[in-house]
Amino acid sequence: MKENKLKQVIHSIGEIPTLPSVVARVMQVLSDPYSSASDLTEIISVDQAMTFRILKMANSAYYGFPRAVATVTEAIVLLGFTTVRNLILTTMMYNFDQMWTPRASQPKPVGSQALFNQRQAWKHAVATAIMTRELLTSQRMSAQENFGFLAGLMHDVGKVLFYHYFLADYAMVLRQESGDQRSLLQREVEVMGAHHGQVGAWMVDRWNLPAEIVTPIACHHAPEEAKEQKALTQVLYMANRLAHATLQDETEAEGLRRPSQPGTMQIWEQLGLSTEQIQNMEKSLLRELQEIEKFMQV
C-alpha cells in the first residue's frame, strides 16, 4: 500500500506543469547579473495583475516614497529587484491552485477546507519566508536571503500536492493531527509513502528552482538530518516555528518559540536572539504580511 502510494505521488509530481512562464522568465532575468529594470519591465508588463500589484506596492504608505510612481520600470528601480522578485513568487503561491492538472482540480469533499485551508497555508508560507529572511539578516547571512525567502515560501508545498491529488488519503493523516510535527511526518510516511518535506523537495527540483533550497525544504522539520546547507536548514526550521507562533494564540506560542529537544535547543542558542529581538521580528512580520495581503487583492 505505502509503496504503491509513493509511486502515485512521484507520478503526480511528474504531471505538475512547469512554473508559469512569467515566473520562469523573471527568475531567469534576475539570475543574470547583466539584466536591467527595463528587461524585467518587458516581462511583467504582459501581466496586468502583476503590473498593478507592483505599482500599488510602490505607491503604498508602507514604502513611503515622496512622489507618485507612474511606471513599472521606476517601481522596480525604487523597490529593488529582490522585493519585486519576492512579490512575484508570493503571487505565484497565492494563485497556486490554478497550476494543477484537471485531475487535481476535481471538486473537493465537503468539509475538506476545514482540514487544509489553502489561504491559511499561503499565509503561513509567506510568514515563514519573511521570518527566514529576518533571521538570516540577524545572523549576517545576507548572501542567503534570496534562497531563504524562497525556501520559506515553498517549504510546505508538499502538503499542497497531497491536498490536490490525494485528499482522501491525506485526510486520514490530518484527522489524526496531534500538533506534534514529528508525528505528522511519521503519519505522512505511513499513509503517503513520504512526508511533505521530501515531496516538496522533489517538486522544487522538478521546477529547476535553486539547488540550495532542496535540502532545507526536505529537512525543515529535522534540521539535524541535513547533509548540506545546514545553516540555512536550521534557520528555516526556526523560522517555521516562529511563523507558527506569530500567527497562533499567545497561549500556544511560547512553546513554539523555544524548542525543547536538545538538538534544536542548540540551534536556538546558536542564533543568540533576545526575547526583544524576536518580538520585534514578529511585529515586523505582521506589518509586512498585512501589506502583502492587501497587494494580493487585485
Image (cartoon, grey):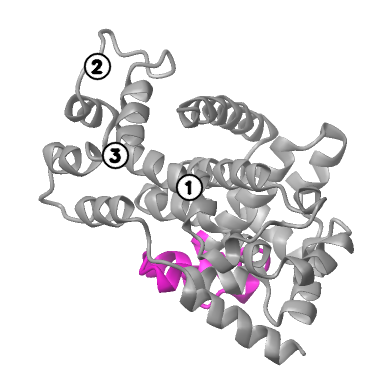
Left or right of 35? Residue 59 is right
The residue at the point 49 percent across, 46 percent down is 95
Q: Residue at x 13, y 48 (%)?
A: 35
Q: Residues within 10 Å of mark 2 (few under 14, many from 20)?
A: some
Residue 269, can we see it? Answer: no
Quadrant showing the C terminus: top left
Where does residue 2 sit, x and y in percent of width and height? 75, 87
Q: Is residue 237 above or below residue 173?
A: above
The local secondary structure at tag 3 comes to: loop
Q: Amino acid at mark 3?
A: Asp
Above or below: residue 246 compared with residue 21: above
Residue 231: within the magenta?
A: yes
Q: Position of residue 40 (x, y in %)?
A: 19, 42
Outermost residue to the top? 66
Residue tagged 2: 69
Provide the secondary structure element on which disc 2 rests: loop
Q: Residue at x 33, y 27 (%)?
A: 52
Q: Of the residues shown, which amino acid type is indicated by label 1?
A: Leu
Please identify, in this view, whether the residue under mark 1 or under mark 3 is nearer the observer: 3
Residue topped by disc 3? 47
Q: Which residues are magenta?
A: 204-232
Q: Is residue 56 left or right of residue 156?
A: left
Q: Position of residue 234 (x, y in %)?
A: 58, 60
Three-letter amino acid code at the position of disc 2? Val
Secondary structure, mark 1, is: helix
Viewer-nearest of discs 3 and 2: 3
Q: Quadrant of residue 67?
A: top left
Name the foreground residue: 105 vs 223. 105
Residue under pointer 1: 136
Q: Earlier in the sequence, mark 1 or mark 3?
A: 3
**Quadrant in the picture for the N terminus:** bottom right
